[in-house]
Image: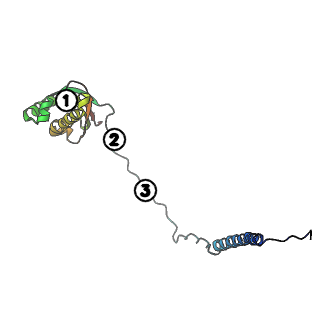
């Protein structure tokens, strides 16, 4: 009995499971192959034109204007002014009207015949009072420049803070349109 070996039942079960898995994978591959080839339809031929196209002659008009496109000038007009910021914060009509006339006098020459596109206004205040500087800048935009109208009518405004101790100083960067 030396040469006889007996198999345990588990070896037969796992050995058969491997062949079963291989057979199922083969069957799956064959099914996918058949499914892709059976449903494949040839593409329809392109339609043939019934009437041959006739060449047409079109003319493109040449532009008559040679004006450059309207855009903002790359360099702003920079201006530092001293105003009564307390009058702005108190909404004092007399003080605001005086600021408006001072601005017209200061900007009359540099902005003659030009339209303003963007205005960046910087209100000065100490670093511990940032909100005061922003509020002064926005009030100046609303009550002085926007109310001015004219060249400032279509402008975009924004107010910012700049550090400093001179509470009455406002810095402007005014971008005008080319042309």
The residue depicted at 56 percent of the width and 69 percent of the height is 46
How dense is the environment of label 3, judged by Cα within 10 Å: few (below 14), some, or many (20 and up)? few
Question: Which tag, 3 or 2, sits closer to the chain's start?
Answer: 3
Question: Which tag, 1 or 2, sits closer to the chain's start?
Answer: 2
Q: Is residue 31 visible?
A: yes
**Farthest residue in the bottom direction?**
38
Of 175 and 83, the residue lying toward us: 83
**Circle 3 is placed at which residue position?**
58
Q: Secondary structure at mark 3?
A: loop
**Rendering coords of residue 19 (x, y %):** 75, 71
Q: Nearer the viewer, mark 3 or mark 2?
A: 2
**Rendering coords of residue 162 (x, y %):** 26, 29
How dense is the environment of label 2, judged by Cα within 10 Å: few (below 14), some, or many (20 and up)? few
**Alpha carbon of mark 3 to alpha carbon of mark 2: how far?**
27 Å
Left or right of 134, for residue 93: left
Question: Which tag, 1 or 3, sits closer to the chain's start?
Answer: 3
Of 30 and 153, the residue lying toward us: 30
**Circle 1 is placed at which residue position?**
107
**Circle 2 is placed at which residue position?**
69
Left or right of 47, for residue 106: left
**Farthest residue in the right direction?**
2
**Alpha carbon of mark 1 to alpha carbon of mark 3: how far?**
51 Å
Name above or below for residue 116 compared with residue 52. above
**Circles 1 and 3 in contact, beta carbons < 8 Å:** no
């Amino acid at each position: 009995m030396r040469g006889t070996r007996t198999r345990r039942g588990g070896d037969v079960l796992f050995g058969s499971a491997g062949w079963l898995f291989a057979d199922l994978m083969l069957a799956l591959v064959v099914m996918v192959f058949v499914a892709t080839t059976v449903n494949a339809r040839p593409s329809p031929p392109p339609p043939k034109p019934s009437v041959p196209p006739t060449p047409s002659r079109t003319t493109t008009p040449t532009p008559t204007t040679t004006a450059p496109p309207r855009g903002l000038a790359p360099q702003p007009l920079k201006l530092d002014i001293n105003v009564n910021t307390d009058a702005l914060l108190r909404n004092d009509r007399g003080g605001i009207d005086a600021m408006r006339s001072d601005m017209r006098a200061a900007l009359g020459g540099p902005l003659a015949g030009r339209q303003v596109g963007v205005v960046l206004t910087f209100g000065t205040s100490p670093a511990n009072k940032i909100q005061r500087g922003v509020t002064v800048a926005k009030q100046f935009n609303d009550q002085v420049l926007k109310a001015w109208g004219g060249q400032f009518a279509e402008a975009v405004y924004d107010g910012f803070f700049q550090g400093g101790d001179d509470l009455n100083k406002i810095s402007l960067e005014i971008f005008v349109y080319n042309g």
